Image (cartoon, grey):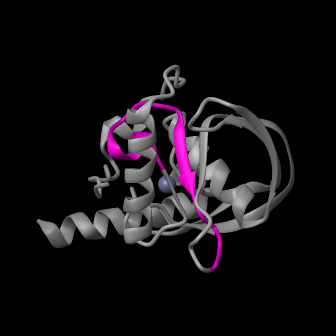
Amino acid sequence: MARLQVLTYPDPRLREPSLPVKVFDEALAGLAADLLETMYAEPAIGLSAPQVDVRSRLLVMDVSERKNRPEVFVNPEVLSSARQGWIEERCMSVPGRSGLVRRATEVRVRARTLEGESFERRLSGLAAVCLLHELDHLDGRLFVDRLSWLGRLRFRAALAMQARRAA
Ligand code: ZN
């Protein structure tokens, strides 16, 4: 296993949509293991393949308190979602920033395991939000795209300040 380099905003590669996984082999399992190791090292609760520059529809997460329940979703699809709420989000690809995002807090998802078996799950609360955040990455979207106009203004102001300090 290895820790992987995570792409950060505004890297254009984060904007490219990922392709469905077709081959369920050892390389895929290895990538999932590396994603988990990278996620746990942060520590973060979720990470997707495109964040480490691999355009495959694969994401990992672990929202358990003891960080001992890793979950892997290959080719995830949302079947239904409900109960919108405002949630404070962070992202390994947007270091040092957070923002309020409106998302569903209940979701039914269909995905495949690393062996290619189809399964369905119902997620709620943090697990639902985390899955939807990571799923956005597979479509080239970031949580900053979902901020309110005020949130976007704050985000841009913070970036401008950062740029001025770096100049
Ligand atoms: Zn993220």
Where is residue 87? Give x, y as percent.
69, 67
Where is residue 81? Give x, y as percent.
84, 45
Where is residue 47? Give x, y as percent.
48, 53
Q: How many labels does the image show?
A: 0
Query: 19 and 136: which one is in front?
Result: 19
Residue interval drawn in magenta: 48-65
Is 5 located above or below residue 115 in the figure?
A: below
Query: 87 and 66: which one is in front?
Result: 66
Question: Residue visible at 53% across and 33% down?
Answer: 57
Question: Residue visible at 49% across and 22% down?
Answer: 23
Quarter that holds the N terminus: bottom left
Quarter that holds the C terminus: bottom left
Q: Does the magenta stretch include residue 107?
A: no
Name the image quarter holding residue 164: bottom left
Query: 11 and 162: which one is in front?
Result: 11
- In the picture, measured across the screen, residue 102 lies left or right of residue 98, that is right
Is 49 located above or below residue 128 in the figure?
A: above
Residue farthest left in this picture? 167
- In the picture, measured across the screen, residue 4 lies left or right of residue 137, that is left
Residue farthest bottom in this picture? 66
- In the picture, measured across the screen, residue 26 lies left or right of residue 101, that is left
Name the image quarter holding residue 166: bottom left
Where is residue 105? Give x, y as percent.
80, 58
Q: Is residue 156 visible?
A: no
Is 123 located above or below residue 21 in the figure?
A: below
Question: Residue visible at 36% across and 35% down?
Answer: 54
Question: Residue visible at 54% across and 33% down?
Answer: 139
Query: 22 and 29: which one is in front?
Result: 29
Q: Does the magenta stretch include residue 55?
A: yes
Q: Is residue 76 visible?
A: yes
